[in-house]
Amino acid sequence: MSFPGLQALIRANRNSVLSLQKNQIFNHPKLKVLLSQHLSPFWEERPNKGSMFLLVLQAAVIDDFDFDRVAVNLKGTVCEATKKHNCIAIDASFEVLEESTMADNYADLAITLSKDSHITFFFGTHGIDVCIDGERLQRVNVFYSEEDSRRFREKYTLAEIEDIFAAYQHELSDPSNYGLFFTDLTAINRINPNHHKQILRNSPEKHFRDHLLKYLNQNTQHTFYKEIELQTTKRETDLFTEWEGRKYMIEIKWLGMSIKKDGSAFTQAMSETAARKGVTQSLEYIQELVEKMRINLKCGYLLVFDARERRQAIDYQGFTFIPSALQAYYKHHFQLLPKLNVVNIHPA
Amino acid sequence: MQSSNNTLKKYRINADVLCLFQAAKSIGWHAVRESSIHRILYLSSVLYAFRSEQTDSDNPFGIYRFSIDKTGPYDSDISRSLEFLYKDEYLERPQHDDTYVIGNNVQPGNARHHSADSSREEWIQIVVHILGIYSENRIYDFVFRDPEYQRVLKTNTQQGLDTDSDNQTATTLRSFKEEFEAALPGEVDSFSNQQYIELYFEYIFSKILKRDIV
C-alpha cells in the first residue's frame, strides 16, 4: 500500500501531529472513546448548535469513566443543565457536580477552566473544542475534520435504498456514464453494417456491476464488494455489503443485446424472461446463503439494467412462478428494485 | 505432549475471548457479534508483529489460523471457544442470535487465571480500545481495508491469512511509519509503534469517511 500525499499532509499538520501524540491525557483511549462515541453524537443531534456550552471534568477521572452512566446522564441531567446554564462540571459518570452561567468568552473560559489538570469540552457551532491542562488542542484528529464527518453522514444508507437508485438512475442518463456500456460502432459494422442500433459490450453484467460498485462506494456510507472476491461460487454479478452486522446482497441482471467475446456476432437478446429467472435465482442464492452458509443475510435485492431498444415494464406475472419452497425468502429477505433504464442511443 | 499443547491452546483462546469482552465492557461495549470476535482477534494477530517487532517464533498469536469465509476472517477454534464459553455460561446470548455478552460465570479474575501472558491480555485491550473509538459497526470496514486481508482476497485462493512478522499489514505499517519519519525527521523518534497503529487506524478511518475505497 502506498501513501500518496501523506508526507505533505503530515508536514501541513506538524503541530497537531506532535502535540496530539505527546499529550498523554488526550491519548488515553477512554477519552477518545468518550469523544467519538458519546460527545460527538450528542453535539451532532443538537438542532441549535449556536446554543453553546462547556463541560469541565478532572483529567484524573478518565480511568474511572462509567460509560453506561455517561450515556444516561449525558442525555439526561447534563442535557437538562445545558438548558439553563453554559458551564457544567461533571464527574466520571457525567453526574453534574456544578452548573453555572458565565460570560460567554468561551475561548478564554475553556482554557482557564482546563488548568490544573482539567479537561474542557466546548460545544460550539462547528464542533467540539478540547482544552487539556490549560492548552487548547488545535485539532482532535490529524487526518479528518468535522466537515469530513458531516459529509459522510449526508451520504445515503441502505435505509434509503430507493433514493440511492433513483439518484443512480439520474447518473445513468449522462452520456459519459451510459456510453461506457456499449460497444463501438466499428465492431457493430463489422458484424452487420445495416445494424444501426446500440449493442452492449461483451459480458455487460460485469460492466454494470463495476459501474454500480463504484457509484455505491462513493455515494453511500457502506463498503460494497464483488462476490467473486469471496472465492467461492464464482457468482460474478453479485455485490455484497455489511451493515450493523447483517449482510446485504445485490444481484444484477440485464436486458438487451450484447456482442460476443470474439466480436463475431451479437448474442441472443435478453428479454424479460431473464428478469423473471433472476428473481428465482436470487431467491435460491439467498436460501443457500442463509441455510447452507449460515450467513446472517438481512435482504437480497434484484436490480435489472434495461438496455433494450424498446423499454417497457417487465411483467413479473404476479410472482406466481416462485416455488413454494422460496416463498418465505421472497416475503422476508427479498426486494425487487425498480429497474434501471439504460439509454440506448449512441452518445455521438 | 500434543494433547497438553492443544489443551493449553484452548485455554489461551478462551482467555483471549474473555479478555476481549472485559476490554469491551470497560468502554461501555457490552454485546459483541460473533463475526466481530473473529475480526478483533484477527486484527490483534496481524498487527502484533508490527507493534512488538518480534520474530515468528515469539508471536503469541500464532495459535490462530485465520482463513477467509463469507463473514471475513475466520478461525474455527474461536467458534469452538464461543460454544464452550456459552455452554458453561461464561458468555450469554440474550437475543438468541449471533451476539454475545459476558455471562454470570465470569468473575474479574477468570480471564487472568487462564492467561499465562499478561502482555497478550494488554494487547487485546489496546486493540479493542482502538476499535471502540470507531464503534463495532466500523470493524468490517477496517478489516476489508486490511492489507493482508486484501492480499489474500486478490489471490482468489483458499490460502490462509498470514499473521507472521512479514505479513502485508505489518509491512504496510512499517511504510506508514517511514512516511512520518521522512516528513518530520528527528521529531517523531519518541513515537511508539502503538502510536503509529493508532494513527494508522485514524488514517484508514479518514479514507472511509472520504469514500476513498480500496
Image (tube, rainbow, N blue to C red):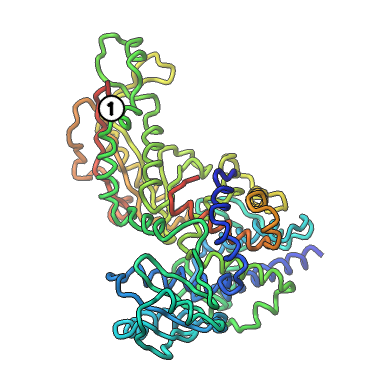
Residue at 47% in and 46% down: B213
Residue at which label 1 appears: A256
The image position of residue B131, as x and y in percent, is 54, 64
Residue B149 visible in the displayed image: yes
Check the residue under mark 1 and report the chain it is in.
A
Q: Quadrant of the C terminus of chain A?
A: top left
The image position of residue A251, as x and y in percent, is 36, 42
Q: Residues within 10 Å of mark 1 (few under 14, many from 20)?
A: many
Residue B26 visible in the displayed image: no
Residue at 65% in and 77% down: B111
Q: Viewed as shown, does residue B214 lie left or right of B75?
A: left
Q: Viewed as shown, does residue B88 lie left or right of A187?
A: right
Q: Is residue A327 above or below residue A200?
A: below
Q: Amino acid at mark 1?
A: Gly
Q: Is residue A178 above or below residue A86?
A: above
Q: Viewed as shown, does residue A315 lie left or right of A130?
A: left
The image position of residue A297, as x and y in percent, is 40, 55
The image position of residue B103, as x and y in percent, is 53, 79
Q: Secondary structure at mark 1?
A: loop
Q: Viewed as shown, does residue B3 lie left or right of A129?
A: right
Q: Quadrant of residue A253?
A: top left
- Residue furthest to the right in view is B1
Viewer-proximal residue among B91 and B45: B45
Q: Quadrant of the N terminus of chain A?
A: top right
- Residue furthest to the bottom in view is A97
